């Protein structure tokens, strides 16, 4: 038997975790089914979700090892590149970036 953890975050700063005992050779799909995630979150469509082990995306048929952490990933609401551009646009060029906190009296770029 191996021990694995299944984790799902339905919202920011909220994590649901299940620790399971599974037989050797269990797959990622079997771990998610055994966790009871579908019963805990009835509106969740697992077919449309990505999953991974320790932050790395994996195939649903990947074989798990002892102490693995299976993670189910939510779809992104906003593209990270677009969000960064919007934050930069709101802050302005002088308030963001590498040289935003320069010392008083320092030369430009230092």
Image (cartoon, rainbow, N blue to C red):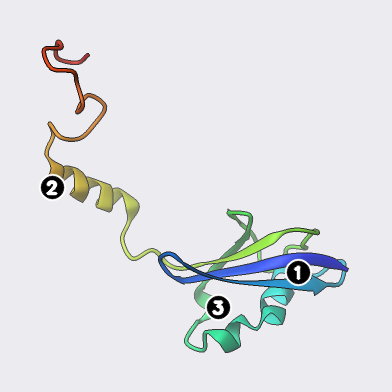
Q: Which mark is residue 47?
A: 3
Q: Residue at x 75, y 73 (%)?
A: 20
Classed neighbour count for the residue bearing mark 1: other residues with Cα under 10 Å, few (<14), some (14–19), many (≥20): some
3D distance between C-alphas at marks 3 and 1 = 16 Å
Q: Would you say 86 lies left or right of 25 here? A: left
Q: Identify the residue at image location x=76%, y=69%.
A: 27
Q: Quadrant of residue 105?
A: top left
Element under label 2? helix
Coordinates of residue 95 in the picture (x, y in percent):
15, 35
Instruction: Give the residue number, with chain letter if any, for mark 2.
Output: 90
54 or 60: nearer the viewer:
54
Q: In this view, does 1 lie to the left or right of 45?
A: right
The x, y position of residue 64, in whole percent, is: 77, 62
Secondary element type, mark 1: loop
Where is 96 relative to 74, above or below? above
**Sequence order check: which comes first, mark 2 or mark 3?**
3
Task: Examine the image and state in which quarter residue 100 appears.
Answer: top left
* Residue 27 higher or lower than 52, as above or below: below
- 46 left or right of 86? right
Tell me which corner region of the image, top left, top right, bottom left or bottom right, holds residue 25: bottom right
Q: Distance between the residues labelled 2 and 3?
A: 37 Å
Judged by depth in the image, the label closer to the viewer, 2 or 3, is 2
* Marks 1,2: beta carbons within 8 A: no
Answer left or right for 62 relative to 95: right
Give the residue number, with chain letter if any, for mark 1: 27
């Amino acid at each position: 038997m191996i021990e694995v953890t299944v984790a799902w975050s339905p919202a920011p700063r909220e994590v649901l975790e299940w620790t399971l005992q599974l037989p050797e050779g269990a797959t990622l799909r079997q771990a998610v089914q055994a966790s009871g995630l579908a019963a805990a979150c009835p509106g969740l469509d697992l077919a449309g979700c990505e999953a991974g082990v320790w932050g790395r995306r994996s195939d649903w048929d990947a074989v798990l090892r002892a102490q693995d952490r299976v993670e189910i990933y939510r779809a992104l609401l906003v593209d990270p590149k677009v969000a960064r551009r919007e934050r930069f646009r709101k802050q302005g060029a002088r308030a963001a970036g590498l040289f935003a906190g320069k010392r008083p009296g320092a030369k430009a770029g230092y």
